[in-house]
Image: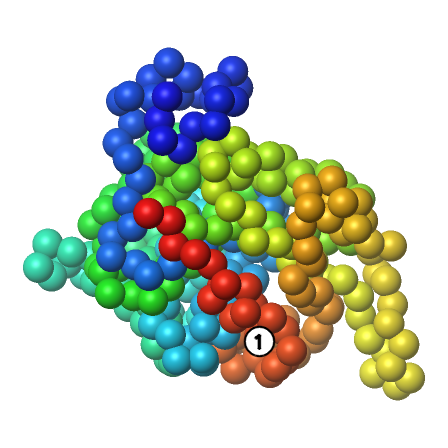
Amino acid sequence: MSESCNGSCSSCPSAGNCSKIPPSTRQGVGRIIAVGSGKGGVGKSTVSALLASALNRAGYSVGVLDADVTGPSIPRLLGVDKAPYVQDNKIQMPASAKGVKVLSVNLLLRDEGSPVVWRGPLISGTIKQFWEDGAWNGLDFAIIDLPPGTADAPLTVMQTVRVDGMLAVTMPQGLSSMIVQKQIHLSEMMDVPLLGLIENMSYAVCPHCGEKWELFGSSHREEIEKSFGLKTLARIPVDRTLAELCDAGRIEDYENEELMQSLVNAAISVTPRA
């Protein structure tokens, strides 16, 4: 078995071929954090961009690997529209206005709205090339925005990248809470430490009286916390200002000191894996 295998081989597509999988690498990055959920539409990319922005604001050098190859949104959130280029045999990553580096398939498309109609092996190969050939060396943090699901692409990340920790993103809705458990189980199978939960779209605040509205019903996060021994590190409200900044490519300008500090605290608590 590979060094990342914990014995749960029966459901692994690489079962019996562990010896053929190259060991995961760090590429000279201080800490590597993946953000996933198992489900689309819960705000993984928003959390990834907020985490990168918070760390950058705190003085750390940060790069984001947009591993959601068929649904990339990191460049739009961070306002990056320049194409990467090759120098010294490494893919040089363009940066946001405030210095967050980004590597994403969308930066290679003529039209950001064009679909990426690729099969699994090509998607996996692209993720591996972005990681192995990207100019990551020397960064304090690499944030990996995982695609939804628990198939080829997330497996490729966890087998290629020496991920130090995983943030699991969920919503109050029961369906989201059920599916995020698949992501948590995958992380455990791949021996990736779980840092905690981020609950997105937790509530909305009435602009007149300040009352909190639970738009998606009562939260199920406590059930997940109890089942997996996790903590909820942050609850992100439905915030019109955040949505407008995301659409404008200015998520780095978002002001929510409590949230941003919570994200920084979670990231700097990570112990790099040998």
Considering only vertical position in the picture, is 183 above or below 73?
Answer: above
Query: What amino acid is found at the position of numbered circle 1 in the picture?
Result: Gln
Residue shown at the point (87%, 68%) measured from the top left: 213
Residue 60, image x, y percentages: 38, 74
Residue 180, image x, y percentages: 65, 42
Left/right of residue 36 with respect to residue 31 in the rendered view = right
Left/right of residue 73 with respect to residue 179 in the rendered view = left
Quadrant housing residue 182: top right
Quadrant housing residue 98: bottom left
Residue shown at the point (61%, 81%) measured from the top left: 257
Q: Give the total number of marks visible in the rendering.
A: 1
**Mark 1 neighbour density, 10 Å: few (under 14) some (14–19) many (20 or more):** some
Residue shown at the point (82%, 75%) measured from the top left: 205
Front residue of 91/227: it is 227
Residue shown at the point (24%, 65%) measured from the top left: 138
Colour convention of the picture: rainbow
Label 1: which secondary element: helix
Residue 227, image x, y percentages: 74, 40
Front residue of 102/142: it is 142
Residue 158, image x, y percentages: 41, 39
Question: In the rendered view of the protein, which quadrant contains the N terminus?
Answer: top left
Quadrant housing residue 16: top left
Residue 76: in sight, yes or no? no
Residue 52: in sight, yes or no? yes
Task: Report which residue position mark 1 lands on.
Answer: 261
Considering only vertical position in the picture, is 141 above or below 218?
Answer: below
